[in-house]
Image: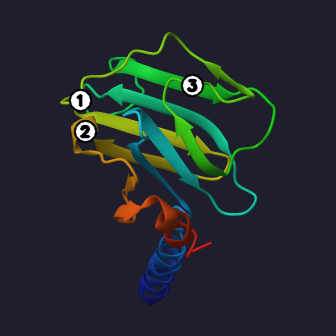
Amino acid sequence: MVEVRILLRRTAVVVLLSLVACIPDPRGDVGVGLSGDGSITVALALCTGDSLTSVLIARVVGDVIGDGDDEFFWQISRTGGIALSSGTLTIGNIPTGFEQQGEYVRPSDRMELAILVTTRDEEFVMDFMPAALDAGVILSEANGSVDVEEFGDLARQDC
């Protein structure tokens, strides 16, 4: 009886580890950069079938972004319209089919910020400082700093 319990426990551990090993990493990528006029941009390169649902930029207080104690600078949520899956958004400009929550406040260039991008299938979180961004370069968690032209191809390699 003891041998059966040990065998069942070992089997359960192997099954659990197999399931955990199969949890996929986020696919596609999201990054931040600067436009020619110095505005912060969000670059999207999502996998086929995925689309943007919300973007939040904040100075995080504590360990959790979006939990109510953060200082929010920009937040939008999709209400309908065209599904966005690639291209760039300029922070402060509301894309068609999205609604802004609160007023846009331009953050200080020296402030440490976090961006939370939620899509239909994924959630991307990244810390950045506006002063560290360059025009024509996208900073992403998955690919580091890459040229705007390279970003989409690199981001979709795992799609």
Callout in the foreground (2, 3): 3
* Percent position of residue 11, x then y: 50, 83
Q: Nearer the viewer, residue 67 or 47?
A: 47
Q: Are marks 2 and 1 in contact (CB under 8 Å)?
A: yes
First of labels 2, 1 by sequence position? 1
Q: Which mark is residue 93?
A: 3
Residue furthest left as drawn = 110
Other-residue count near label 3 (Cα within 10 Å), few / some / many at <14 / 14–19 / ≥20: few
Label 1: element kind: loop
Residue beneath the point at 42% across and 40% down: 36
Tell me the distance, in whole angstroms, between the alpha carbons under discs 3 and 1. Answer: 18 Å
In the rendered view, would you say 140 is above or below 36?
A: below
Tell me the distance, in whole angstroms, between the alpha carbons under discs 2 and 3. Answer: 20 Å
Name the side, left or right, on which 45 lies relative to 129: right
Residue beneath the point at 47% across and 49% down: 124
Disc 2 target residue: 129
The image quarter containing residue 53 is: top right
Q: Are marks 3 and 1 in contact (CB under 8 Å)?
A: no
